[in-house]
Amino acid sequence: MSSIEAPLSPVDAQLPGDMVSGSQSAAGAVVGAPVPSEKKSDYKGFVAGVFSGIAKLSVGHPFDTVKVRLQTSKEGHFKGPLDCVLQTVRKEGVSGLYKGATPPLVGWMVMDSVMLGSLTLYRRLLLENVFSKPAIRSLTPFASYQPDPKTLPSFGHGIAGILAGTTVSFVAAPVEHIKARLQIQYAADKSKRMYSGPIDCLKKLLRTHGIAGLYRGLCATILFRSFFFFWWGSYDVLTQWMKNNTSMSAPVINFWAGGISAQIFWLTSYPSDVVKQRLMTDPMGGALGDGERKFRRWKDAARAVYRRELNSLLAKYYLPVPTSPPVQIFRLVLINSSNHGRQIEPAPILVTNSTLLIPALPRSFHRSIRPEMAVARMRRTNPVTLLLAAILAFGFVIFVLSPSTSSASPVRAGSGSASSSSSSQQRREDDAAENPLSPPTKAFFKSQPVRHDGQQAPPPVVQYDLNQLSSSSNSATKGERILILTPMARFVPEYWDNVVKLTYPHELISIGFIIPTNKEGNAALAALEDAIGKTQSGPIDKRFASISILRQDFEPPLQSQDEKERHKIANQKARRESMSRARNSLLFTTLGPATAWVLWLDADIVETPQTLIQDLTAHDYPVLVPNCYQRYYNSEKKKMDVRPYDYNSWIDSSTAQNMAAEMGPEEILLEGYAEMPTYRTLMAHLADTTNPNPKKIIELDGVGGTALMVKAEVHRDGAMFPAFPFYHLVETEGFAKMAKRLGYSVYGLPDYFVYHQNE
């Protein structure tokens, strides 16, 4: 076997499960993790590789020994893998299966470290220098299915695999060369072996053939590892597909994607592995005195395998190749079913451990095989074997099709009307608000039952595992909870009507408000409670999971909520600092352990697409803001028209940065005022209102808060709305700066519109 680098996941990379010959385990990679973007993360791949190499050796080396012996032995030496194991144990003991284990014990730690570290590095370099360029990305195969410019496409994962495989080949070639020569020593008595151990083998190879002899098979090793393209490329495709189309948890996705991608890799690379092993175990000749060399180059070995032995090798030696459990089980069922009750006719294509691949070869190819090749007959299959195989196969089918227990039940959110199934209805009833006005935020507990002594039971102590909390592009399907937060000074009926029309499952939505304690605030509270009472007392599928109303404990800086008064430049610093305090109070009070996304929605937003939540979460970005416009009557055109409203979403400019550098510590930059020309690129001016592309994305440096979707983890990591000059920015623009300082990217949708009330 080739020492395939077990991809135990570095923290920042998305890697499949550990793969060794004949065995397979799933590593706990994070599904959907982005390609690492910081150099400091590269070392994690090396550390993970060290431990994966140790774990792989203890399990995989016996399978490797069997495979190498089957690949390199003379025809008829072994009847199959089981016969190889029995002969090895009978003649050499169990230790015979671990011959040549010392080189990989040291080598695999280094090889896996180099493999995973270089893979992480190549992924980052390819993303930053190649696939981030639109011209190159547009020419990349299948990149249209992965439009996010910040994500490495599957084709890029494959290229990174080739580069990493080539890099590690310079370490792997001598290790595998020594290992293979030790594994084909059949003598039980050490005195009769050519090499007493790995050090002796290394010395003899260097003494008789030099460095070139030690590195014999390097080209074949590079060729074999070039098939890492299929391994890493298929793994990325499979994980993304399973993430988007199934409800399986991350460990289950890693298990299945790792197993299937391993199967794809071995099915494509196995012939090159046979060539490599034949070349590495071929006599060196010369002063070593081990026989006459048959193959001068890897091409000679490839021709020999192809012309004379390919068919038999495929028939005999695909069994030790690492395959995922369900593939092996279905293979067992099909083979036994197709051959039950009859013997296999003598033919050079079938042996005791026949595979499904062989019957597909053309008859003309079968006839080209030498007639003197050994043939074995398959025994009549025991019916008990068929029964057990069928039961196991059925179990794996149930395992695949059953939704993960860590995922929420799938919820369809396309029409606004929820599923009528009894389970969905029961969940709505369980999640529905206990009080129609302002119950506690989900997932805090409803009131506890009264005990027999008349006292109310205390709330239970509960532990929450936030590692199981997901925020993904399939938010509705995965049952991810949304928290809509709205600071409100005036109640606008159109705002509430728009929220009620959102088609995201209402039982997954919690809403929080914060209202000032002045006269206007009291009026807003009364109107809001009336609207909430009607909704929360109505049909269950229209009710929200919970609604919380907070009152500010500080006076607003402006008594008037007139639009012109609110937007005067002289009032901005005090007004926006007060808004920051309100937003932070609302956020820290209502953010619950089950919240996956936070949607900030101004109380003046009166029109959005009904699929607003699904549309924004589908991009799976940590911070995303749509373009806020306003409808108005254009007196020049004599018809209704639209115009930009929110100018706080922007791309920074050198002019603004220079202005900030000259400001005092308490001064702030403001956008959208002629008195303070920053010459920033405003997203409001980048919109195409004629032929909009709602999925167009740009990266931003500042955001507005009229409609702002934020992953809850961004807030949990500490990103809030500074009520003080933070890099000369406050409120939502300061939040964007803080999020970027925490390592999150900020994006905008210039052609996706929400509309502000026209006062």
Image: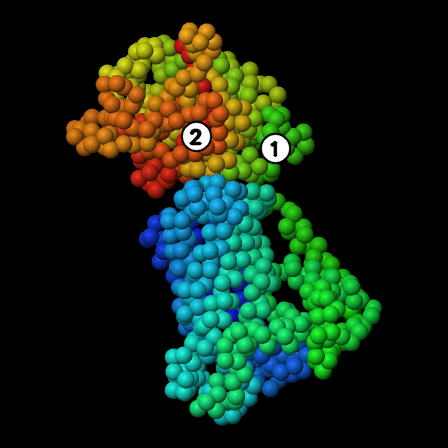
Q: How crowded is mark 1: few (under 14 residues within 10 Å), some or many (20 or more)?
A: some
Residue 609 position in % (x across, y down)? 52, 23
Q: In which quarter of the image is residue 476?
A: top right
Q: Residue drawn at (65%, 47%), measured in percent from left and top?
A: 401
In the displayed structure, does residue 301 sit left or right of residue 600? right
Point out the tag, 1 or 2, that comes first from the N-terminus.
Answer: 1
Residue 118 rendering spot, x and y as whole percentages? 39, 59
Between disc 1 and disc 2, the foreground one is 2
Look at the numbered discs 1 and 2 and tell me whether their residues touch, using CB distance below 8 Å: no
Instruction: Look at 49% across and 25% down and name the residue there.
Output: 691
Please state, as top left, top right, bottom left or bottom right, where the N terminus lies in the image: bottom right
Q: Is residue 302 visible?
A: yes
Q: Mark 1 points at which residue?
A: 412
How far across and down, in percent of the image, does residue 5 sit? Answer: 47, 64
Relative side of 325 to 485, left or right: right
Quadrant of residue 268 within the rendered picture: bottom right
- Up the image or down, 23 lies above or below 102; here it is above
The residue lying toward the viewer, choosing from 48 and 596, is 48
Residue kind at label 2, given as amino acid type:
Leu
Q: In this view, does 317 lie to the left or right of 650?
A: right
The residue beneath circle 2 is: 749
Q: How crowded is mark 2: few (under 14 residues within 10 Å), some or many (20 or more)?
A: many
